[in-house]
Image (spheres, rainbow, N blue to C red):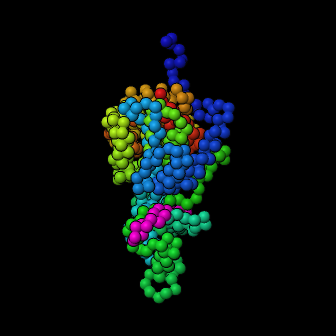
Amino acid sequence: MEITRDLLMRKPAPAYEKLKDGEWEQVLAYAKGYKDFLDAGKTERDCVAEAAFQAEKQRIPVYTRHGKAIMLIRRGKRPLSEGLRIVAAHIDSPRIDLKPYPLYEKDGFALLKTHYYGGIKKYHWLASPLELRGIVYLRDGTAVKIAPGNDSPVLFITDVLPHLGTDQMKKKVAEAFPGESLNVTAGTVPDAEEGDDRIKFAVLSALHKRYGMTEHDFQSAELCLVPAGNARDAGLDGSMIGAYGHDDRSCSYAAMRALFDCPAPEYTCVCIMADKEEIGSEGITGMQSAFYDTVLEEMCTAEGTPLSICYQNSFCFSGDVTNAFDPNFADVSDPQNNARMGHGPCVMKATGRGGKSGSSDASAETMSKTRRLLDGAGVCWQMGELGKVDQGGGGTVAKFLAMRNIEVVDIGVPVLNMHAPMEVAAKIDCWQTYKAFLALYNDC
Ligand SMILES: [Zn+2]
């Protein structure tokens, strides 16, 4: 190669500048489908139900565990001994769970005690409309879905008024909002009957009327508070989506849609929507669970291939969001190595914190394949790291795929306000992420 200025990597251009005729319409149509998915999927259970519903329409086999984790599989032409093409994303998002004995009455209010789930900045969740969702198993084992109706009242956690916030404002943010103070206001009207806890009793009566549940039934329930309201277009130009749960439904949805759109793949394609990523991928529905192996092992056994060989020849995108560079908080990032909104999905060679600790740190071999795959499919993509070295960090499901001897790299949508009740992602990044996952499923 002649020594010319081409030695330099060209500064990455925003994905908007590479759009072909008619593609912006595709971006908007994709964004609409995604917003509908977000509105249907406020919890992992809701996401599983919606994904299963959509997959069954496409006649794609569905494997679920406890209604909280789901795998969609599309068989390819090649034998399983040649490996799978996997996109693994997660469908749980940070939220506020109810405690096992949540309901109590104090100072004229019925309240609910909570225990937050995942890494939140607690103050985001105060004075903000919330809704109760989940499942309750009644004494006889009947499952009752808890979901707000169209005109259901919202719930909320109070914050102190600024007029009386002098002491609160002096505290460090990390100390100003103790977890035990995140109690949800649930009612104010006392029941007409004489007795103790008349407001609490009135709230329970309302729950009983609607769901048939008693206070005992909280023992076999999973109930959580999530932001009320639907996904909205964001920005004066409407180029973004403001919604709860981009982390990581932007990647889950992209993986699902890509699987739907690869009718005759070369390799068997797997879309994993895992639970519990936000608390370490634990539990039988988290990425560490043998559930995923059990499903795939059964398939491999039928073909006479050891699962270990299938894994060894597989390639996986761990689809998870990363932080988009934020000009309001520029000093937490290395601007040269931070994902930019509107530049397509960000490939993360490594995640983790404090010297890449807890990261599976993809090999150059894996990066080489990724690069050729994405460039070959004309995907607009970028690389980055989550913020400045030693500023903090985070993990994904990638290392749990790597533990299974599956080649894996992180790739996902750059978002603003990560883990806040309203996260923001660019429509074009969501769509380019879908294209990246489609490129993996179409690998040949
Ligand atoms: Zn995530």
Magenta residues (range): 126-145
Extreme residue toward the top, this view: 2
432 relative to 9, above or below? below
Of 390 and 324, nearer the camera is 324
257 displayed left or right of 171? right
**Which of the 4 quarters of the picture holds residue 359?**
top left
Residue for point 34% across, 39% down: 301
Indicate yes or no whether the magenta region holds residue 138: yes
Image x and y of residue 162, in percent: 53, 65
69 relative to 299, above or below? below
Residue for point 57% across, 39% down: 431
186 relative to 415, above or below? below
Image x and y of residue 220, in percent: 39, 66
Q: Is residue 304 visible?
A: yes
**Which of the 4 quarters of the picture holds residue 137?**
bottom left
Image x and y of residue 321, in percent: 48, 43
Image x and y of residue 119, in percent: 42, 53
Q: Total of numbered circles in the picture?
A: 0
Indicate yes or no whether the magenta region holds residue 182: no
Q: Is residue 90 visible?
A: no
Of 222 and 165, nearer the camera is 222
Of 315 and 269, nearer the camera is 269
Residue for point 43% across, 30% down: 78
112 relative to 333, above or below? below
Residue for point 46% across, 54% down: 44
